[in-house]
Image (spheres, coloured by chain):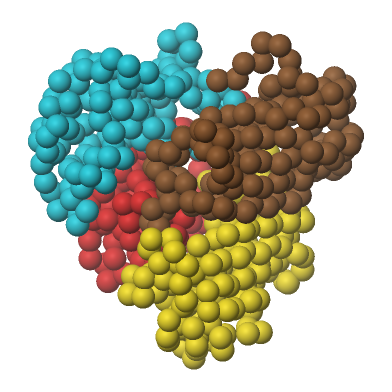
Chain colours: A yellow, B cyan, C brown, D red
Amino acid sequence: MNFEHEQRLRVRYAETDQMGVVYYANYLIWFEVGRVEYCRAIGVSYKEMEKVANCFLAVVEANCRYHAPLTYDMEFVLRTRLTHFKRGFLAFDYRLVNLDGSGPLAVGWTKHIVTGPDGNPKNIPHPYAGLFKSGTPVSGSEVE
Amino acid sequence: MNFEHEQRLRVRYAETDQMGVVYYANYLIWFEVGRVEYCRAIGVSYKEMEKVANCFLAVVEANCRYHAPLTYDMEFVLRTRLTHFKRGFLAFDYRLVNLDGSGPLAVGWTKHIVTGPDGNPKNIPHPYAGLFKSGTPVSGSEVE
Amino acid sequence: MNFEHEQRLRVRYAETDQMGVVYYANYLIWFEVGRVEYCRAIGVSYKEMEKVANCFLAVVEANCRYHAPLTYDMEFVLRTRLTHFKRGFLAFDYRLVNLDGSGPLAVGWTKHIVTGPDGNPKNIPHPYAGLFKSGTPVSGSEVE
Amino acid sequence: MNFEHEQRLRVRYAETDQMGVVYYANYLIWFEVGRVEYCRAIGVSYKEMEKVANCFLAVVEANCRYHAPLTYDMEFVLRTRLTHFKRGFLAFDYRLVNLDGSGPLAVGWTKHIVTGPDGNPKNIPHPYAGLFKSGTPVSGSEVE
């Protein structure tokens, strides 16, 4: 579970506000992108997990610390790690850094419980549980 | 079907971009707010129509002309009208004006087909069809 | 500084995601709405503070705990309080409750430093500092 | 000016709504991404054009036709072309297709006038005017 997923992203115009920097809620959207790509990298299609296994990762808490502003068109790297995994609970943390690794520009985390479509807690079934537990990137998991 | 619904709105900080004005995609979000409040005013709960009658208004085309920029914290009025109604098709138009009625700040329209949850076309059932057809505000439809 | 501002809001369709509930980043947008309306209620136009006094409230940290999902078209009350105020630092907390006061649906907080347009820290000038310090709703501050 | 820029994109969870498909306003955000990447491909940094040349592309009209719904996690290709260029006016069109080129999933266009930071019309200065006029991808313009 030491695997850290790296995703390169570029700031969209839509993501800025009139202060000339990225609006603070948009970091949570990026965290979601990082989370999904982390899952894909370890062999979990989050889409399939929802559709086939009826498993949802409902956010119960989110946090972000903003260290340096991001501006329009800037490229950065989002580093995502799974920090806790129990059958019905997961936590991720996120680190935004410059392309050269300097930073951080922002750090954050999210906590999730696993639910069914009705919102009731449940456990992550196989094979997803095993994939999260090992937290190992599958070969050929090149995410663009 | 001459009823025009008026909704007062205020520009949120999140809706601005670094040009210092409202980002152009956000007008379509306001159009949706106007559409929903138009429905509520004539006695149609769009939420209920989706949930109970399994009817969705899927957008097939949207258009917006931007006449004057809107800036942060500005209040404006969104005027929404139903311009076409057939059993399986609706069109709305939208007009953003200043609080004193001057403008327009923007005008637009959307076209919708009625679908089931599967995306297949269907007709709007009763009582919704009748309410759209008459397009009359129901008494006590004060929408805040 | 015990004043709690109340803002009534309704969930927009745009704010939902395919889980059928409000997407988690949107709570931070509402927090910003609550913050701005809190300011307006105590006599501070945030817009003017940016434009005239060149003062920006840059977010340095944000947090949200999600207690119960919000669904499309639901109305709720956002309660905003200023919890810390120093010349160059402010913190707000937020509480989302049902219209009847039950809940909370979500709770959160944000921390801000005061900056100039260049992003450098500065102090809030008069008269804004006094207004934040007293944190008293001004008469006629009816915010819709 | 026959150059068509291709950008591969993936649907984010945040971009869906409770209908289970992409919310209609988000297409305009993608159009902006396509526009910016088109510019980059022909050698124009839109960021620099704003900052250095004080030139803004203000949207005066936008249109989108939605042919087939896009769902979460789906990958697609956005094809962007510059269709009109005069010194103070530009128009782009956009075409969303599947990865195999089938579709379209959606088509749209935007019209823009060139303005200064004050919102007043102006002409695009050199060297940007020439780059738009030739509309030729510069070598080494690999956009990721």
In percent of width and height, residue C90 lies at: 81, 39
Question: Which residue is at the front of the view, D76 or C82?
Answer: C82
In percent of width and height, residue B96 lies at: 41, 21
Height in image: A133 above or below A12?
Answer: below
Taking the image as shown, residue B78 lies to the left or right of residue B115, namely right
Determine which quarter of the picture holds residue A119.
bottom left
Asked whether residue B122 appears in the rendered view, the answer is yes
Which residue is at 73% across, 72% downward?
A: A101
In percent of width and height, residue B7 lies at: 41, 21
Which residue is at 81% across, 42% downward?
A: C113
Q: Residue furthest top?
A: B100
Which residue is at 38% across, 63% downward?
A: A117
Height in image: D111 above or below B9?
Answer: below
Q: Residue furthest bottom?
A: A139
In percent of width and height, residue A3 lies at: 63, 83
Question: Which residue is at the front of the view, B4 or C27?
Answer: C27
Which residue is at 51% across, 33% downward?
A: C99
Taking the image as shown, residue C42 lies to the left or right of residue C124, namely left
Height in image: C143 above or below A39?
Answer: above
